Image (cartoon, rainbow, N blue to C red):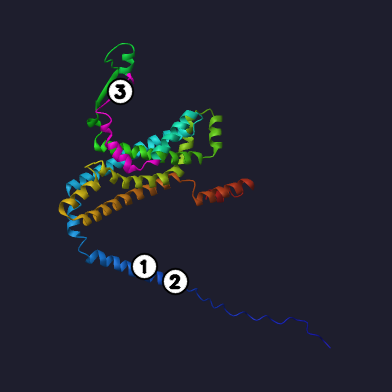
Amino acid sequence: MSVDTGTPARARPEPIQAVPVRHPGRWVAVAVIAVLTAMFVHLLVTNKAFNWAFMVDEMFRPPIIAGLRGTIALLVTSMVIGIGLGIVLAVMRLSENPILRGVSWVYTWFFRAVPRLVLAILFGNLGILWARIEFGLPFDRQIGALFGVQNFEARLFGFTAVEILTGFVAGMLALGLSEAAYMAEIVRAGIQSVDEGQTEAAQALGMSRGQILRRIVLPQAMRVIVPPTGNETIAMLKDTSLVSFVPVSMELFFQLRAVGSRTFQVFPMLVAATLWYLALTSVLLVGQYYLERHFSKGFGRSERARQRLRDIAAESGGNASGTAER
């Protein structure tokens, strides 16, 4: 009598009936967003308070374009002052000299603590302190009186405060000096993000501290510095409207507000200001994107993958070198 020891054939499993996961919440969110968008478009189209024809006709007139140029000039000059002085302050903060570190800390503390609107108004009224600004030996008259010389003056040159402290210059200094305090922290963080081994290797090659900073540290720190600097530039563009309280007449918001006050069409001019700032910010965002892409070369995901392949190739004796190169 024989015993059947064979295993029975396993039945083929039935095909999986995949049921897609339903997301009703997504459709609810889409419906809510669509309704809100339709309501907003209806507001823009039907509400006569916008007065689109008047707004478009006024926002491109010569005074507005002159104010636009003034805003761009104020933005560029303020950021040049802020970035240049911020780099100096960051280097001072990282210096081994305690006096330089202390001066940098006090500067950063003061200008980060005082609001920019207050600074703008303060700088606009500096003419109250001096009718004439002169450069020379301090306490010259007091020193002369100490030695019996009356009306002794040791001043090289000077100028009246009204000539130099115009509204534009006052606003530029207020914004630029304030920006330098923030840029100092950004640059300091970028410098500290660079591996110290880079500095040690450069010192071993005999490079000076200035050469190391210019050629080794700052080029690598730019990857960290550029994104927050772009944000600061956009914030500075918006803060240029603060100088209208100095006042600075050749400024975009000042001109738009003047048109609104003169024609009693305040709200359309506020919308025009919003559109102008949106357009300028969009241009700055595009520039920031390309700058970030330029200084991020070699730090992306693909480059890290290539570096990993090179490391594997080195560990395996170069067998994967061709793959790493591709």
Point out the tag, 2 or 1, that comes first from the N-terminus. 2
Residue 56, image x, y percentages: 19, 56
* Residue 199 shows up from this direction: yes
Residue depicted at x 44% and y 33%: 104
Q: Which mark is residue 208?
A: none
Helix, strand or loop for disc 1: helix
Residue 156, image x, y percentages: 28, 19
Which amino acid lies under the numbered mark 2 shown in the image of this protein? Gly
Which amino acid lies under the numbered mark 3 shown in the image of this protein? Phe
- Whether the magenta-drawn stretch holds residue 127 is answered as yes
Helix, strand or loop for disc 2: helix
Residue depicted at x 37% and y 71%: 31
Q: Which residues are magenta?
A: 113-139
Q: Is residue 130 left or right of residue 264?
A: right
Judging by the rendered image, the residue that carries numbered circle 2 is: 25
Q: Kindly report which numbered mark, 1 or 3, lies closer to the viewer in this rendering.
A: 3
Q: Which mark is residue 33?
A: 1
| Mark 1: few/some/many CA within 10 Å (<14, 14-19, 20+) | few
Residue depicted at x 71% and y 82%: 8
Q: CA distance from mark 1 to mark 3?
A: 63 Å
Judging by the rendered image, the residue that carries numbered circle 3 is: 135
Q: CA distance from mark 2 to mark 1?
A: 12 Å
Point out the tag, 3 or 2, that comes first from the N-terminus. 2
